[in-house]
Image: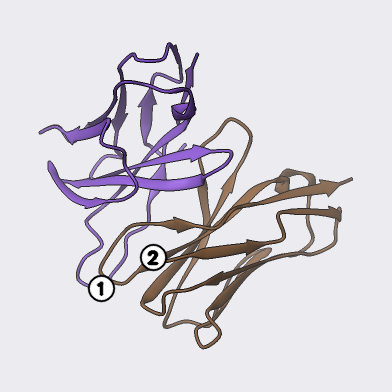
Chain colours: A purple, B brown
């Protein structure tokens, strides 16, 4: 158990809908990352938050957004869902930002499997 | 941006044999290289990592080597056991950042 929790475990919805995925980082970790894992794209970085602020952005669609709250949990919002958004969404956390030349280990949660019908 | 290639995509070994997975990266600014193991229905779990100031690191049956000049790194698993069966991912991270760029994964099957 990594200490990172994600809810829900499974989510089934229809095209055009909006969903929210939730992540709680390990105790003491300030950074949260979101990754998407699909069969054709593999594991891809979406976005990073550190202590409530966005720090890095990857291949995240405009239909997707995220935020990190004062208690450090994070939510990933996916809207206008398409069939191609079906994937596993992982949250990871680390102690800090990775800046200053030292990269922090990222610990992954169990993921949310999103199925768009 | 960074690109990480991983080979092979599948690997079948007999229990007790060794398994080797190789990755190459494109950005010479990358300086941190973790390896993750993903079992069915679970999230990636860090098994070992190496930083660019080190050439080799070992942890029991698992070892990782890094060749900065050639921009490649490898995972070695010795005395494989059935519980080593999983998908393994290599990743690279650029200095002063935390974005993981993953390889495509290697599905390892250890046959008893």
Residue carrying label 1:
A101
Badge 1 marks a residue whose secondary structure is loop
Report the quarter where the C terminus of chain B lies.
top right
User: x, y (%) of residue B25?
Assistant: 51, 71
User: x, y (%) of residue A64?
Assistant: 28, 32
Q: In the picture shown, does residue A62 fall above or below A28?
A: above
Disc number placed over residue B93 in the picture, else none? 2
Residues at marks 2 and 1, common chain?
no
Q: Residues within 10 Å of mark 2 (few under 14, many from 20)?
A: many
Decide if residue B70 is on the left or right side of residue A112. Answer: right
Disc number placed over residue B66 in the picture, else none? none
Q: CA distance from mark 2 to mark 1?
A: 11 Å
Q: Say which chain tag 1 marks.
A: A
Decide if residue B82 is on the left or right side of residue B71. Answer: right
**In which quarter of the view is residue A8 placed?**
top left
User: x, y (%) of residue B82?
Assistant: 79, 45
Badge 2 marks a residue whose secondary structure is strand
Residue shown at the point (70%, 54%) measured from the top left: B9
Q: Say which chain tag 2 marks.
A: B
**In which quarter of the view is residue B2 placed?**
bottom left
């Amino acid at each position: 158990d990594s200490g990172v929790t994600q809810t829900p475990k499974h989510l089934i919805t229809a095209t055009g809908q909006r969903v929210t995925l939730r992540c709680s980082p390990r105790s003491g970790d300030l950074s949260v990352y979101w990754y998407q894992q699909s069969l054709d794209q593999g594991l891809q970085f979406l976005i990073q938050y550190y202590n409530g602020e966005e720090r890095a952005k990857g291949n995240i669609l405009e239909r997707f957004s995220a935020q990190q709250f004062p208690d450090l949990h994070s939510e990933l919002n996916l809207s206008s869902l398409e069939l191609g958004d079906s994937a596993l969404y992982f949250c990871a956390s680390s102690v800090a930002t990775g800046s200053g030349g030292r990269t922090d280990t990222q610990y992954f949660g169990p993921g949310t499997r999103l199925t768009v019908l | 941006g960074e690109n990480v290639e991983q080979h092979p995509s599948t690997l079948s070994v007999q229990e007790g044999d060794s398994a080797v997975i190789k990755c190459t990266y494109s950005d010479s600014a990358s300086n941190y290289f973790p390896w993750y193991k993903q079992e069915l229905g679970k999230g990636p779990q860090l098994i070992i990592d190496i930083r660019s100031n080190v050439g080799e690191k070992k942890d029991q049956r698992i070892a990782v080597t890094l060749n900065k000049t050639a921009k490649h790194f490898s995972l070695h698993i010795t005395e494989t056991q059935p519980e080593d069966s999983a998908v393994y991912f290599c990743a690279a991270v650029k200095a002063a950042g935390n974005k993981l760029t993953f390889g495509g994964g290697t599905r390892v099957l250890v046959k008893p």
